[in-house]
């Protein structure tokens, strides 16, 4: 297995584990997609962290050696599975944190862009979309998600040059949400993930879907999506607990239901 999966206090941990650089082939993408589906379907998982089990590398994208002799049909299927894996992250009504502590290149960065938050460790590594160096373009959502996250010209420059950037620059651009000292990185990521997992995770998930789906529509359609999700939440056990706790002047004990 190239993808490890575990659960820690409501946090589903998806770990790339394909030494040396966590480059993926078709089989790894299927494992990743299956792990994301497990997060979606397992009630014991309330938040997910995507990380690497290997030092120095988060993920360096596709294993080029497996693509060199692929037919056009095989490559097209590879792209479909790749996009499905990332799309599954964006469609799952649970929060995903990408925990980056090593080189995050090509499809590795595209996977991180599909997550809701990107936390990174301080260190001497690079992030980038380098597909142009192979005569290709980003194929796992990079051309769409990066320009929605940072200024279009900045995103375009990264993609057409293939030049990687250090984590400090990625933070300044807005690609990363937080940069954490290496010594405390894993501890801080997991502490934040557990805090989210103890919250009203059903509401968190619907907020995520309202934002992701609403931004692709008109304001009126987005407001309709928001109302629909709010009406569904109002019937949840977490809302009943939240209202009761507020009136009783105590902290709510959310169960994610």
Image: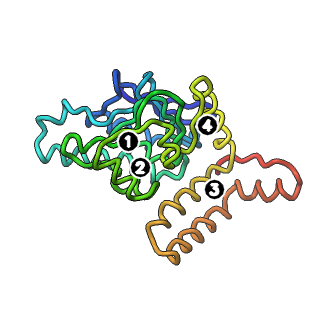
Q: What kind of element bears circle 3?
A: helix
Nearer-N-terminus badge (3/1)? 1
Q: Residue at x 44, y 57 (%)?
A: 151
Which numbered marker is on residue 203?
Answer: 3
Do residues under tags 1 and 4 come within 8 Å of each other at their CB atoms?
A: no
Residue at screen point 39% across, 47% down: 86
- Whether pointer 2 and pointer 1 mark residues with C-beta atoms closer than 8 Å, the reply is yes
Residue 86 is left or right of residue 191, and the answer is left
Label 4 Cα crowd, 10 Å radius (few <14 / some 14-19 / many 20+): many
* Residue 219 higher or lower than 78, as above or below: below
Q: Where is residue 195 in the image (x, y as percent from the top left)?
A: 68, 40
Q: Could you give the CA–CA distance between mark 4 and mark 3, rounded to whole angstroms? A: 16 Å
Q: Which residue has dot 2 on it?
A: 88
Q: Using the image as rendered, state which of residue 230 and residue 100 is in the foreground.
A: 100
Drawn side of residue 204 relative to residue 39, left or right:
right
Q: Name the residue: 75% across, 58% down.
A: 240
Contact flag, marks 3 and 1 (Cβ < 8 Å): no
Q: Specify which label sits upstream in the sequence, 2 or 1.
A: 1
Residue, disc 1: 33
**Which of the pair 2/176 is nearer the observer?**
176
Viewer-nearest residue: 104 or 246: 104
Secondary structure of residue under mark 1: helix
Residue 50: tell me if it is visible: yes
Q: Position of residue 84 (x, y in %)?
A: 34, 49
What's the CA distance linking mark 2 and mark 1? 7 Å
Quickly name the residue at label 4: 10
Q: Which of marks 4 and 2 is nearer the N terminus?
A: 4
Answer above or below: position of 24 versus 148: above
Q: Badge 1: how crowded within 10 Å, few (<14), some, or many (20+)? A: many
Tell me the distance, in whole angstroms, between the alpha carbons under discs 3 and 2: 19 Å
Q: How crowded is mark 2: few (under 14 residues within 10 Å), some or many (20 or more)?
A: some
Q: Distance between the residues labelled 1 and 4?
A: 20 Å
């Amino acid at each position: 297995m190239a993808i490890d999966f575990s659960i820690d206090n409501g946090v589903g941990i998806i770990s790339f584990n394909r030494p040396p650089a966590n480059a993926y082939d078709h089989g790894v993408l299927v494992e990743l997609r299956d792990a994301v589906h497990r997060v979606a379907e397992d009630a014991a998982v309330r938040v997910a962290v995507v990380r690497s089990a290997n030092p120095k590398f988060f993920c360096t994208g596709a294993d080029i050696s497996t693509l060199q002799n692929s037919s056009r049909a095989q490559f097209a299927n590879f792209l479909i599975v790749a996009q499905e894996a990332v799309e599954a992250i964006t469609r799952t009504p649970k929060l995903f944190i990408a925990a980056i502590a090593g080189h995050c290149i090509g499809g590795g960065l595209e996977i991180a862009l599909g997550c809701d938050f990107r936390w990174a460790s301080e260190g001497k590594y690079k992030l980038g979309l380098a597909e142009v160096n192979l005569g290709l373009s980003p194929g796992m959502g990079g051309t769409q998600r990066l320009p929605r996250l940072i200024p279009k010209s900045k995103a375009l420059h990264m993609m057409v040059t293939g030049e990687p950037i250090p984590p400090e620059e990625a933070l300044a651009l807005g690609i990363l949400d937080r940069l954490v000292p290496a010594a405390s990185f894993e501890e801080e990521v997991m502490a934040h993930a557990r805090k989210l997992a103890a919250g009203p995770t059903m509401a968190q998930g619907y907020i995520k879907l309202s934002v992701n789906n609403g931004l692709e529509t008109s304001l009126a359609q987005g407001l309709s999506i928001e109302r629909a999700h709010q009406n569904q939440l109002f019937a949840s056990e977490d809302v009943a607990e939240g209202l009761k706790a507020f009136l009783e002047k105590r902290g709510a004990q959310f169960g994610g239901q």
